[in-house]
Amino acid sequence: MHEFPKLNKRTRKREFSLYTEEERSAVVYYWLFSRKGFRELDTLCLGLDGRESHGWQSMGVAHYLGLDETHHGFFIQATPSYALTTLLLHRKVDPAFSLIYCYLRDWFVQHPQSDDLTEELAKEKDPDYHTDRVEASYWIKETLLSKAPQQEIDKKLLNLLSIDASDQTVKLGSKRYYYSKGALKQAVKYLYDFQCQICSTRIYRPGWVKTLSREEQWEFLNADAHHIQPLSQEGPDSLTNLLCLCPSCHRRFHTKQFTLLEHNYKVGCEDQVLHRSWEVLTKHPIQLTKT
């Protein structure tokens, strides 16, 4: 089979933002594994009348990911394992390949066609390949941080303080954009470069070197995002309600060993067992109580 064509991404995001992960997965699968046109995909994948929608909705989804006519039916004769392996091999070239991989993987998991989809290839247990996380990372890098100089990264990430949770949009300049549902969790990790706000621990993966750019280093770091007021207890889904934590500190908040406190306009952490406290690393405003 020929080399997978280079992605040709478009900047228009409106159609992509309107549909669910499952609907996007269907568009990706049928565009790569069939010769069905966009009018047919609007009907088959998005529940529209393709004669009236003219295929613009599925086309918008595909084009935002960089899929165009050169990719149409590319994997018709391929096995699921071959297609997924091909996409994984290209993920370092462009982050969109990771997202296309996730959508295609999700389709095959829901619609099994063969037994060659191994656990390692599916990567369902690998948090770095959870669709919402990959989707959020892609949105942040392609929309929020697009062409941003290194010194502007924090400022761009802090734009997420201006979200409107009612319609899941954020104001960037004079326009409002839909943001991916996992964007806030990823943003707080990126803001702190995956450094725990409590103990300053940073978890590295093989491949990390200091000479990489800030955004490149993120690919080799790991951390958790913690909601201060749990969403299950009506805590706000906002950047001010999130902390970047290492897994150990994260567990200590959930066992109530750690609690947050505010003193002299500074946020601190108190260990309820060892009876000591210290100041929390803060680069964004933190809300300790529900408003």
Image (cartoon, rainbow, N blue to C red):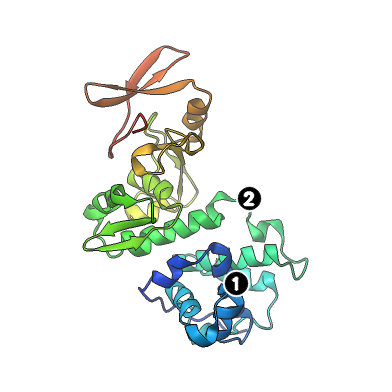
The earlier-in-sequence mark between 1 and 2 is: 1
Residue displayed at 29% across by 62% down: 176
Q: Quadrant of residue 245?
A: top left
* Residue 211 seen in this snapshot: no
Q: Nearer the viewer, residue 186 or 128?
A: 186
Residue type at tag 1 = Ala
State the image coordinates of residue 44 (x, y, percent, origin top left): 61, 78
Q: Secondary structure at mark 1?
A: helix
Q: Would residue 59 be found to the left or right of residue 80 on screen?
A: left
* Residue holding disc 2: 125
The mark lying in front, picked from 1 and 2, is 1
Q: Nearer the viewer, residue 41 or 63?
A: 41
Residue displayed at 59% across by 83% down: 74
Q: Count the numbered circles shown.
A: 2
Q: Is residue 37 above or below residue 263?
A: below
State the image coordinates of residue 158 (x, y, percent, origin top left): 28, 48
Q: Is residue 59 above or below residue 110?
A: below
Residue type at tag 2 = Lys
Q: Is residue 118 above or below residue 182?
A: below
Neighbours of disc 2 within 10 Å: few (<14), some (14-19), many (20+): few
Q: Is residue 115 above or below residue 221?
A: below
Residue displayed at 66% across by 73% down: 82
State the image coordinates of residue 139 (x, y, percent, origin top left): 40, 61
Q: Quadrant of residue 270?
A: top left
* Residue 185 seen in this snapshot: yes
* Residue holding disc 1: 26
Q: Secondary structure at mark 2?
A: loop
Q: Looking at the figure, which quarter contains the N terminus?
A: bottom right
- Alpha carbon distance from label 1 to label 2: 22 Å
Name the disc covering residue 254, or none. Answer: none
